[in-house]
Amino acid sequence: MRAAGPVPVNLYGLEEEALAALLAPLDPARFRARQVFAWLYARRVTDPSAWTDLPKALRAELAARFAPLPPRVAARHAASDGTVKFVLELPKGGQVEAVAIPAEERMTFCISSQVGCGFGCAFCMTAKLGFTRNLDPGEIVGQVAALLAETGTPAGEYNIVFMGMGEPLQNVENVLAALRILTHERGFGLGPRRITVSTVGLPKGIRRLAQEPVVPRLAVSLVAADAEVRRSLMPVARTVALEELADAVREFGEGRRDEPTLECVMLDGVNDAPELAHKLAKLARRAGAKVNLIEFNPTPALPFRPSPEARLEFFLRVLSAAGVVGTVRRSRGKDAFAACGQLAFLQKP
């Protein structure tokens, strides 16, 4: 029996410095890494034989030694409102879900940062999967490439939200590498204000994100501005005090055009009492943040119901009276289990 050859190195997800180091033994010209980087991400061509501005012999060497492998679409689930959930097979094994959400002004891609999630939020179906592993940069940006190809969305005419599976700031270094590829002029070329990173609220990760030269928008899943209520719904609240979180959010937003966002999934009879609206307004002012009230998307395995419209309107009035910008995020894609909090392989249409 013939012995198996070496496993080709996956180029997909590497930045220019890493590409240059790999290419140097084959061609020391520094600009070759820039060319390969542009083919992988700006042009989204992963077959080395098609990289026509490289010498033919170099293309053959690259094809023999390397295997640019982004995620592959394995399944699609379309909702009645045009939202589409994609199941993607990962080169390293496992699956994640990503969602394309069309709107009149711009497409939005909701992408994942981990396989599963280990934070155990009571209102989120992904939490029921538990944590498997972090995604690498190629597995993150590859979701964007796959959704661009599937939807035919023109370059630059879309937003990205890290609101899929996983906690981005638990995988912060890989997420930061992905952000650099997504915003690089020879990468996906997306402006940082078109990218939002959503977190359960990890102050250390928030401060790390703020140190980057290119900083995205920030959204924090607050759920409740009452410590006891938040602890009952989000285990992370047992180790991160509300005041510590608010201060980290305020520091992140200082000197930036875009206010951070505090997100509250509104649960009937759980976190929508009148006194919690006033606490939310006070905390938002301390954090220098706006507020997004999120309609809860019911799922068979969770015991919650969405807050009535009248309570959402009450919260908005309290926020406005306190000088805090508040909005309601309406559900998209829930009949395909593609809405916020519904991404989990144990439930499918």
Image (spheres, rainbow, N blue to C red):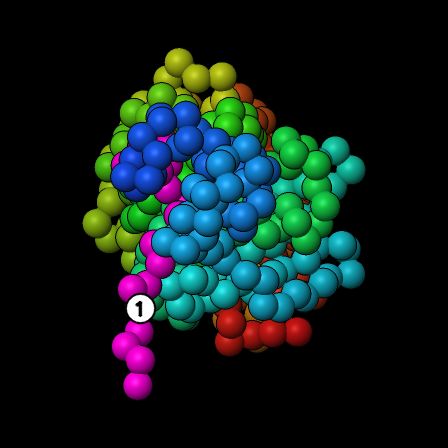
Q: Pick whichever, 152 or 16, lies toward us.
A: 16
Instruction: Give the side of residue 158 with respect to residue 266, left or right.
Output: right
- Residue extent of the magenta highlight: 1-21
Label 1: state its secondary structure: loop
The disc labelled 1 sits on which kind of residue?
Gly
**Is residue 225 in sight in this rendering?**
no
Q: Is residue 223 above or below residue 281?
A: below
Say few, some or many: other residues with alpha carbon within 10 Å of mark 1 (under 14 / 14 to 19 / 20 or more).
Answer: few
Task: Report if residue 6 lies within the magenta region.
Answer: yes
Q: Is residue 127 above or below residue 185?
A: below
Q: Residue at x 54, y 28 (%)?
A: 189
Q: Residue at x 51, y 25 (%)?
A: 185
Instruction: Give the side of residue 90 with respect to residue 108, left or right.
Output: left
Q: Name the quadrant of the C terminus.
A: bottom right
Q: Residue at x 50, y 28 (%)?
A: 186
Q: Can you identify the residue that label 1 sits on?
A: 5
